[in-house]
Amino acid sequence: MGGDRAPDEIVAGARRAATELGLPVVLVGPPERLVGCGLEVLAASQVIAMDADAGSSVRTMKDSSLVRAAEAVRDGRASAMVSAGNTGATMASALLRMGRIKGVARPAIATAIPVPNSTPTVLLDAGANAECNAEWLVQFAQMGAVFCRHRFGIDEPTVAVLSIGEEPTKGTALVKEAHALLADGRALAAAGARFVGNVEGRDIMTEAADVIVTDGFTGNVALKTLEGGLRALVGALLEAFASSEQARDASERLRPALAPLYATFEPEGIGGAMLLGVDGVCIISHGSSSSTAVFNAIRVAAEAVEADMVGRIRSVVAAV
Amino acid sequence: MGGDRAPDEIVAGARRAATELGLPVVLVGPPERLVGCGLEVLAASQVIAMDADAGSSVRTMKDSSLVRAAEAVRDGRASAMVSAGNTGATMASALLRMGRIKGVARPAIATAIPVPNSTPTVLLDAGANAECNAEWLVQFAQMGAVFCRHRFGIDEPTVAVLSIGEEPTKGTALVKEAHALLADGRALAAAGARFVGNVEGRDIMTEAADVIVTDGFTGNVALKTLEGGLRALVGALLEAFASSEQARDASERLRPALAPLYATFEPEGIGGAMLLGVDGVCIISHGSSSSTAVFNAIRVAAEAVEADMVGRIRSVVAAV
């Protein structure tokens, strides 16, 4: 029931995943609004609004679709949850109902950011924890490395700290301390990853590092700034393409060349962010998710289950 | 002498400013490398490297072009300084030689970020102070409002705090405190500006606010993330445009429609960032500045002098 286009786009994406991927998708929500969709329905009478306060909603709305979905994972009735709803409430439901993996200080949101002609960069924390300490960032690096390896097949992911200069002396106290802890090497060796130092904002969409760690405030600002910037440029391009008969005609002829680019930069192709550190697979899809975004998020959820992402994170965290 | 393309591009931009704008531009650097350029030269024998440590360079290299340029402003031999060199050393030179405006806690870098079909958004601090307190952010808001009014002609600029949600309860302790101080209204009333609450990263390239304040770490990450994202998308576009005979032909026909867009998104058109709060005009141009970027930076410097930006900031800060 979550997301700006729920339930129609959510249901459409779920049906497509069931048909094309052969996955047994369960919908959680008010049965009367989901009848006839051809998928199993888990009843939940309440809906947490997109702008509701996360903590109090999850505490008081025990029959909400978000809380029931997290319980389904906890109870083994589902292998993963996917939500395009209120991000804070999704995190709180997962955290409170599934619990944290033993040894994890704080779950973090890992987002895959497209890199032209390469595998995406995993950025975390993209918003779960506005304020962090250096030890958490080290754990984010470990969890991000595991995610990167099993999601994108990178054998020994490179890890960097997001800063405002490459020098270890630049940045905030948090960045300097995280840099020093990661430079030690042992924490990342346990996760099969390698530290490459600090990177800057301009390196996110390049091959500078496979995993970039930062606090949830900075990560969220970076992610949304990127989203806004790309949207502004794409909007201006589309306006230019439509600005005259000649431009319309020329842009039509450019379509085959531009199509692969659309696939790279389109956030819906990426398949949502994953909340790492909770004891179950939880995929957070964009609030404006279309059926394609939901389809991809379900695909990524299934892959995370297949890859035993949670078990692998548990092993790495336990090993340190 | 600063910048990746110094001195050739710097000299070319300076000559263009002298010719087209009729400005008496003074070059600061080793005279033997600047002979025959037709502009007044102020001798300086040393050059602070782009990657040199800012503080120690400025303290020890007293005959560097950066230090001498800042001294020229202090001594009234120049009305403003423009540098595409080491940003940290530029700030340190300006701060140590020109000094701060009385009452200013910390100078901040104000950058103008393009907004399609509108005036740019002024983002500050874009990197002068990695760690800030809420009172500094309030002063950044005042200085940014003065800059915005006199640079872009906005009568009553709107001011926002960069956060990870619009609600005053979201974000870091710094953001919440700055929000509370600005919501009071008095600090901004003195600067003729109006507080509009929190905005997110995706709002930077929109008309959500004329001035957005943040700490220098977040601001620098946001700015460089935007730069990297736009560069990645533009690079991918150019690749697509060149990918086949048909694409090359079609993109050639699109050129008239795309030209104005280039002017909007091209950072070189913006004219550099301004260090607000020091007792003199100091424009920081991008390290990779071409002659066009240098020309625009000099134009902006001249406009800031004409508008008495420093005097106006002094009045607002003194009034609070």
Image: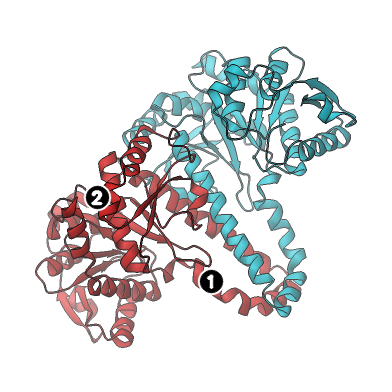
Chain colours: A cyan, B red
Helix, strand or loop under label 1: helix
Tell me: B311 left or right of A21: left
- Closer to viewer: mark 1 or mark 2: 1
Compared with B15, B109 (above or below) is above
Q: Residue at x 59, y 15 (%)?
A: A99
Query: In the figure, residue A151 lies in which quadrant?
Result: top right
Between residues B151 and A195, which one lies in front from this camera angle? B151
Q: Residue at x 64, y 40 (%)?
A: A286
The label shown at residue B53 is 2
Crowding at dot 2, Cα within 10 Å, few <14 / some 14-19 / many 20+, comes out as some
Tell me: B320 left or right of A37: left
Q: Position of residue B310 (x, y in %)?
A: 20, 64
Q: Residue at x 50, y 72 (%)?
A: B263
Helix, strand or loop under label 2: loop
> What amino acid type is highlighted by mark number 1?
Tyr
Compared with A278, B254 (above or below) is below
Mark earlier in primary sequence (1, 2): 2
Q: Residue furthest left?
A: B75
Q: Position of residue A97 (x, y in %)?
A: 62, 15
Between residues B9 and A267, which one lies in front from this camera angle? A267
Q: Residue at x 66, y 76 (%)?
A: B254
Q: Position of residue B87 (x, y in %)?
A: 29, 57
Quarter holding the N terminus of chain B is bottom left
Crowding at dot 1, Cα within 10 Å, few <14 / some 14-19 / many 20+, comes out as some
The label shown at residue B262 is 1
Between marks 1 and 2, how big is the CA–CA gap? Answer: 35 Å
Tell me: A276 left or right of B5: right
Tell me: B29 left or right of B243: left
Query: In the figure, residue B294 lies in which quadrant?
Result: bottom left
Q: Chain of mark 1?
A: B
Q: Chain of mark 2?
A: B
Between residues A25 and A299, which one lies in front from this camera angle? A25
